[in-house]
Amino acid sequence: MRSIAVLTAAAALLAAGFGVQLNAQAPSAAPGRGTPRATFPAQQRPPGDPVLIARGKTIYEINCRACHGPDLRGGDVGGPNLLRSDIVLKDDIGELIEPIIRNGKMTPGVTLVMPPMPQLTSADVRAVAEFIHDVVSTARGQGAPPPGPPVVLNILVGDAKAGQAYFAAKCSACHSPTGDLGGLASRIPDPKTLQNAWVAGGGVGGRAGAPANRVTVTVTQPSGERVQGALVRVDDFMVVLTTADGQRRSFARRGATPRVEINDPRDAHTDLLSVYTDKDIHDVTAYLVTLK
């Protein structure tokens, strides 16, 4: 088994060989299809010759796959990612790739980092370049949604009765289906949004005009004076709050003085994050969507 150090060194050296070289300046105009193109991803190439691409794939699999991987993202030997290679993007028909493949790469003062491949003809390099460009063009669409209409996920797969029982056991101390959560499903009609909101404790309750999930703080001075209000900011050195009459008060903190007690209504939701099962979440959601 190759050591991690050897593989890491190989990756770095190969990056120096093919990666740094790939930053070489391209000719002002390349032959064939080549005129200076815009930088990636604005570059657009017409589809290549399928026969030439297939031939290039075969040559690549034999000579290049071990270093650069089947998808050009780097292989077992640790070669650089060709999808992000500047020279690959600037190359047109192999004119920038061929010198590297044919001559290899030596780093001054270091051993050979990419062996030359004189056995490959210019036609072979041309085919390999066409294959590489085809893979790069295909990779541009990776990460995008699959073609066709968007997939609609049905998250209403829980048992509403079980959800009601769970709600009664875990949630009823703070929430009421006929009180703060009355009409919840009408206010948040999308089940996915509703589920995300209640799991995070994101202000699904409350009525219009009432601040949802307001974090409050009580500061008790050494003299016994207690000041309460909405928390604005707190850290190891300062606590800032707004009192009920709109005054902003700031208190310096020195260790445990003054005493600071923070009440965050979302704490109960946070505590349950390590307790919920998938079934619990689905059941409660199935119940909450009935609160219209």
Image: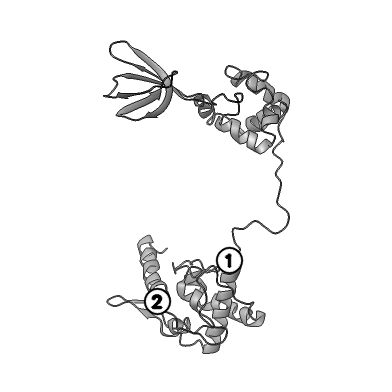
Callout 1 secondary element: helix
Q: Which mark is residue 139?
A: 1
Question: Which is nearer the eye, 55 or 227?
Answer: 227
Place of residue 91 in the rendered image (x, y in percent of width and height, measured from the top left): 50, 79
Mark 1 or 2, nearer chain start: 2
Q: Give the CA separation, mark 1 to mark 2.
A: 22 Å
Dot 1 alpha-carbon crowd within 10 angstroms: few under 14, some 14 to 19, many 20 or more? few
Dot 2 alpha-carbon crowd within 10 angstroms: few under 14, some 14 to 19, many 20 or more? some
Question: Extreme top residue here?
Answer: 224
Residue 47 picture quarter: bottom right
Q: Please name the amino acid that badge 1 sits on.
A: Ala
Quick check: 188 left or right of 244?
A: right
Task: Report if residue 59 is visible in the image.
Answer: no
In this rendering, the answer to whether 283 lies above or below 38 is above
Place of residue 148 in the rendered image (x, y in percent of width and height, measured from the top left): 73, 57
Quick check: 210 left or right of 235?
A: right
Residue 49 picture quarter: bottom right
Residue 123 picture quarter: bottom right
Residue at screen point 30% across, 19% down: 258
Residue at screen point 46% across, 83% down: 28
Place of residue 255 in the rendered image (x, y in percent of width and height, measured from the top left): 27, 24
Q: Please name the amino acid that badge 2 sits on.
A: Gln
Residue at screen point 70% across, 44% down: 153
Q: Which mark is residue 21?
A: 2
